[in-house]
Structure formats: C-alpha cells, structure tokens
Image (tube, rainbow, N blue to C red):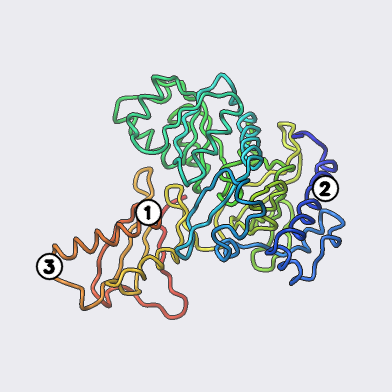
Amino acid sequence: MECMPREDLEKMQYIELKKLINNLYSFNQFYHDRMKAEKVHPDDIKTLSDIRKLPFMYKQDLRDNYPTKMFTVPNNEIVRYHVSSGTSGKPTLVGYTRDDLDYWSEALARSFTSIGIGPEDTMQVSYGYGLFTGGLGAHYGAEKVGATVLPTSTGNTERQIELMQDLEVTAIACTPSYFIHLMDTAKKMGVSIKNDTKLRVATLGAEPWSESMRQHIEEETGIKAYDIYGTSEMAGPMFTECEKREGIHIPADIMYVEIIDPETGEPCNDGDKGEMVVTMLKKEAMPLVRYRIKDITSITHEPCECGRTSPRIGRISGRSDDMLIIRGINVFPSQIEYTLLQIPEVENQYMIYVSREGALDRMRLQVEIKPEVFSDKIEDMIKLRSHIESELKKYLNIAVEVELNAPGDLPRFEGKAKRVIDNRVI
C-alpha cells in the first residue's frame, strides 16, 4: 500500500471518492443540498481531478450543524465522541464509528512504524486524555504496533520523569513545548535524559515548532524528534514524518489532500505554499469533503527516499485565519470575545498577549471593566479577576492570566482592530 505506484494510488482514491460522494448525495441532507446549490451531481465526478467541482466545507458548517446533524450514521453506530474548541462558544463535536477508530489507529500505526517504533518499545503518551484527541490517538496507534503504552497524560512532570527512568521508556508523544518543559524539569532534578534514560524517539505536535527547536531538543537529549500532524475534525493526530524527515506522509487510501490559494481557491503547484484542504475518503460517522483546514503548507507527490510513494506535506508554517495554538489547544479570539460578553461587568474592549516563557506558552488578557464596577477596593477586583479567569478556563480549557483595566485604558483602532499580540518566536 505505502509503496504503490502513484497511478494505482490515484485510481484507488478515485474509487473511494466516487463511493463517498454517491453515498453522501443519496443519504445526507447537508451534502445533498450543498451539491445541488453548486449544481454538481455525483455523475459529474469522472476523474480524481473533478473533485475540484465539489464545494468546500468550512468549520462554520460544523458549528451550524452542532451537535450531530452532520453525522451520516445512526447514533447506535457511534462508539466515541471527541470535542474541540469552537470559535463562538460552541465546540466542534466529532463522532466515530468502530471503523473510524480502526482507520485512525491504522494511520498512526503506519506512521510509528515508519520511524522505527514497534513491539520492543515503551511509549509514554504525554498528550492530554479525554475530550482532546491527542492522548487516545497516540495511545491506540502505539498499541496497534505492539508497543507498551504508558498513559501519563499532561502534568505531574517530576513523576513522569521518574516513570520514564523506572520503566525504561524509549518513545514519547507530546507537544514540543511540554517536552522542553520536561527537559528543564529533568535538569532541576539532576536527571540527564541523554544519559539517565532509554528515550530515543519523540513524536511532537499539536502546536507550531521549528527546525531550530528540533535541533535544540536533539542536541540536549540525544533523541530523534519527529513532526506529527492531525486535527480533531480529521481524527486527531494521524501522520508523521518517516525516518528521512522530508515531509509528513499522508496515507492516500485514507485521505486526499489539496493545497489551494486561500484567496482564490485555485490549486497550487507542488512545492508552493497554500491552504490545506482535506477529503476523508473512508470516514463514516462525519465525512469531510474538501474541508478547509486553514493550515498553511505545501505538498509533494514525488516518491520519498524511504521508498514510500504517498504524498507528503511540509511543516505547517501558519494559519489562514486567526486561530492561536496555546499549549496544544486551539484558541480563537472570537471565542474569548464570546466568553467575555457573557460577563456583565466587562466592557467589549480587550487585548490578547501571547508569549513563550521558557518552554511553555503564556496567554495574558487585558480587559476593560465597566465604570460602575471599577473599584479601588482590591478585594473586589481580585474577586472579579478570579471569576473572569475561571470562566475563560471553563470555555477555553487553558489558564489565562487576566489584567483588569479602567474604562478607556486600552487602545482603540480605526478599521480592523488588532487585538492579538503574539510575541512567541516560532
């Protein structure tokens, strides 16, 4: 499968695409209506390139059809839900059938195999478990290749380092910023990851990171660090680089990827950067057809030196929208605004500051307080600040440091407001 000639891969993709489109047009009201509105019929899809005739899907479609209107199977076939951040107070809900979970595990198993993870390894999964897809995704992929899984989740870092030593962990999956935090904590404990552990490989993702960060990690620890990619709508973390590290392999039998100009929607040439658009060829519970991920990357269809012929995408270099990724969690300014608007004491003026202190991201929020509420009483302000921080954490799933400002303190803008200052060096 992974070394199949490109011509055969594309034939297989076309067959899967035709089955998908016929099924959705016949049995899913959303897709049927969307295709009719665009005057496109399944019979119009005669080649793989005809996928461009199909309409785009957007995250707004998922929000508009929350919670389960997008699903294409009955509830009794759903075996799991995952939930991610939304931009207007509503999260993105994704459902999975048993086959969906198997395809997800299969994609990760291929990826882990491509970087040498197998039955002799113990993998420490330090992504969050629960509604977030990271932890369980890596967990099942590692089990499928026969590795032993240590499900540490996030936090309790000193204990994680002790377990890494005691259980002779050889692989880890987490965000790059958490791994650097783990490195710093190990140093404070007098532990050398290079000399005092068996760790040899890390799959790092869920947030942007650079080649210089990879170099720093590898020089300090002696491990090999690999980029991993996925989104909750697709199924969470799914794909990694292989040992050659010349791009992230996309299994062509599971997903079809396009790179488009984000302004015009026209396809980009191989190697040119643009917005990634995905079609999940085999997803049952909540299929995606030409879904605009908003991540900026490039694609190549040239065979890899490893022998695999699957398409490869480059490192994600940014977003075509305003989403921030903070410690692996998607955060939208409009989501913050929605939360603040639910708090009567707060004005509609705010500023978001993002920085990186040591290995971890920090988000600081300045908000204006209504005149009748603003007070010189420290106790009242502390109580209000705590309430705002609590509400933000409830909706964003991350801690935000809040600063209260008097009415009129924050800058005003002519035209489009710039409410986000991201001072991180990626």
Q: Nearer the viewer, mark 3 or mark 2?
A: 2
**First reached walking from the N terminus: tag 3 or tag 2:** 2
Q: CA distance from mark 2 to mark 1?
A: 47 Å
The first of marks 1 and 3 along the sequence is 1
User: Which percent across, then down, holds residue 78?
Assistant: 60, 46
- Crowdedness near tag 2: few (<14), some (14–19) or many (≥20) residues, C-alpha within 10 Å: few
Q: Residues within 10 Å of mark 3 (few under 14, many from 20)?
A: few
Q: Nearer the viewer, mark 1 or mark 3?
A: 3
**Residues marked 2 and 1 touching at CB (< 8 Å):** no
| Nearest to N terminus: mark 2 or mark 1 | 2
Where is mark 2, residue-wise?
A: 15
User: Amino acid type of disc 2?
Assistant: Ile
Q: Quadrant of residue 141?
A: top right
Q: Position of residue 288 (x, y in %)?
A: 67, 55
Q: What amino acid is at disc 1?
A: Ser
Residue 365 left/right relative to 8: left
Q: Is residue 352 left or right of residue 115?
A: left
Task: Report helix, strand or loop for mark 1.
Answer: strand
- Label 3, label 2: how far apart the Cα atoms are: 69 Å
Q: Position of residue 363 (x, y in %)?
A: 36, 56
Q: Which residue is mark 1?
A: 355
Q: Which residue is mark 3?
A: 377
